[in-house]
């Protein structure tokens, strides 16, 4: 089920008594980390309310094809593109028949035609309807048309709601969720909780002024997206930046180093990998003026006090998450990075040479050397997204070693 983390599952519910089991199905898929959106046919809404499905999926339910308002929100083509997988459960005899004819006479059938995503279908109907040659012919037609893109889940045999016994029961939600998870490749960090700090911190001097560092947040944001794509559950603790947050990543916005520390500590209980890419201000003003400091004397002194070291605090925590730090050095990179690795009790450190003006800080590119107690690896200049993917691969390998 770990493979469902961050996956976008579009659940199509058609009309049948088994529709009530979709409440549990959505709960299982969401618990496994999937983002779920639901389409209901008008028949489905006779059996279970859209409100139930909305509450469980956390997203509005889609049911109208020709409603301009609904189409303005997320139309059928957008829904079809959004899905990593389309799951139809329960699939009634009527729906299977309409799909086999290639019809697009409601939202669900239209999305089926419009999507390139793999389709999983969990039939559910009376045993005689399932055995009917027309239903069987429709299933064969669908399988021939979709090939490997279609997975049929069940149906199960047993006692039916109408009292009959035989094949046609919808598979249990647990079995459906497992079959859906099996359609996805395993990711390097499936289900692993990763917390990433990014961007600068701002240390207030007075209500209008602050001390900060150069940092665009690009590297940390790219790492968050790469960790998400590897299947991780990602929390991004971000200082003030101007770039958009990656989707399917939980973002906690902070301003100062003390805020960042507090946010990091409140994530520690579930955190398995902690990556500190933030450019935290080393010092903060000893006191913050309540009012704007007036321009008067030619010289002004601000007393600074040291900020807590966030990554070292995390690394000292028990249980210790796999902790990754960054080091921005201008000389003797390996020596200073290895010193920081040992001093802060890190598991791995990513060092960049900030004396070079073509990479690092606000640039889109970066080149780094990575050090860990038993090894090291060099990554030559590449864009931050490619570098983030390479770093996540290395971090996942060392985390599991
Ligand atoms: O000691 P230095 O600032 O060079 O260490 C850099 C590493 O430590 C980075 O990973 C940075 O995010 C982290 N750091 C921190 N809290 C601080 C200072 C640095 O987490 N107060």
Image (spheres, helix red, strand yellow):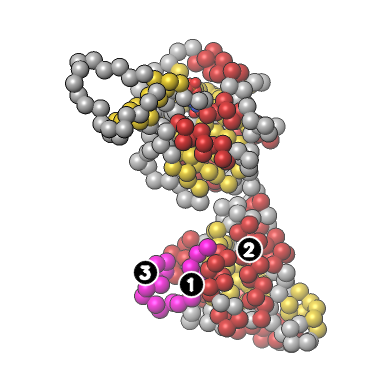
Q: Which residues are magenta?
A: 58-75
Which of the two discs, 3 and 2, labels the residue nearer the N terminus?
Answer: 2
Residue in the image at 48% along x and 35% along y: 260
Which part of the image, by quadrant, shows the C terminus? top right
* Local SS, label 2: helix
Q: Main secondary structure of the magenta part?
A: loop
**Quarter-of-image position of residue 169:** bottom right
Label 3, label 2: how far apart the Cα atoms are? 27 Å
The residue under label 3 is 72
Mark 2 or 1: in front is: 2
Looking at the image, residue 134 sits to the left or right of residue 228; the answer is right
Residue 100 visible in the snapshot: no
Circle number at residue 27? 2
Q: Nearer the viewer, residue 37 or 49?
A: 49
Within 10 Å of disc 2 (Cα), the crowding (few <14, some 14-19, many 20+) is some
The residue under label 1 is 62
Label 3, label 1: how far apart the Cα atoms are? 12 Å
Does 301 lie within the magenta span?
Answer: no
Residue 171 visible in the snapshot: yes
Residue in the image at 60% along x and 33% along y: 395
Mark 3 or 2: in front is: 2
Looking at the image, residue 82 sits to the left or right of residue 298; the answer is right
* Local SS, label 3: helix
**In x, y percent, where is residue 246?**
45, 47
Q: Nearer the viewer, residue 275 or 239?
A: 239
């Amino acid at each position: 089920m770990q493979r469902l983390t961050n996956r976008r599952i579009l659940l199509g519910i058609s009309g049948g008594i088994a529709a009530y089991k979709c409440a549990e199905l959505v709960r299982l898929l969401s618990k496994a980390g999937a983002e779920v959106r639901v389409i209901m046919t008008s028949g489905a809404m006779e059996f279970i309310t859209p409100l139930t499905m909305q509450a469980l999926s956390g997203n509005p339910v889609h049911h109208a094809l020709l409603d301009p308002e609904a189409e303005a929100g997320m139309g059928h083509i957008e829904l079809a593109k959004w899905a990593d997988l389309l799951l139809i459960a329960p699939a009634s005899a009527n729906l299977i028949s309409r799909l086999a004819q290639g019809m697009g006479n409601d939202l669900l059938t239209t999305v089926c035609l419009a999507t390139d995503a793999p389709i999983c279908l969990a039939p559910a109907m009376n045993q005689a309807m399932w055995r009917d040659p027309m239903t069987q012919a429709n299933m064969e037609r669908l399988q021939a048309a979709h090939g490997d893109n279609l997975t049929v889940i069940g149906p199960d045999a047993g006692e039916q709601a109408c009292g009959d016994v035989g094949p046609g029961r919808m598979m249990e939600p647990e079995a459906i969720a497992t079959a859906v998870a099996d359609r996805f490749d395993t990711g390097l960090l499936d289900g692993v909780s990763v917390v990433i700090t990014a961007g600068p911190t701002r240390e207030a001097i007075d209500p209008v002024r602050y001390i900060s560092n150069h940092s665009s947040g690009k590297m940390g944001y790219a790492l968050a997206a790469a960790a998400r794509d590897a299947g991780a559950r990602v929390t991004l603790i971000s200082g003030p930046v101007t770039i958009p947050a990656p989707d399917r990543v939980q973002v906690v916005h902070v301003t100062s180093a003390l805020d960042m520390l507090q946010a990091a500590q409140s994530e520690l209980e579930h955190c398995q990998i902690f990556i500190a890419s933030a450019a935290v201000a080393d010092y903060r003003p000893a006191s913050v003026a309540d009012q704007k400091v007036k321009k008067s004397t030619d010289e002004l002194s601000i007393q600074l006090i040291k900020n807590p070291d966030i990554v070292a605090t995390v690394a000292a925590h028990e249980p210790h998450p796999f902790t990754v730090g960054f080091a921005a050095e201008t000389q003797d990179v390996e020596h200073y990075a290895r010193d920081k690795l040992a001093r802060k009790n890190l598991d791995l450190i990513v060092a960049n040479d900030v004396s070079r003006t073509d990479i690092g800080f606000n640039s889109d590119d970066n080149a780094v050397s990575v050090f860990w107690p038993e090894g090291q690896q060099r990554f030559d200049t590449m864009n931050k997204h490619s570098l983030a993917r390479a770093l996540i691969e290395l971090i996942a390998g060392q985390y599991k070693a």
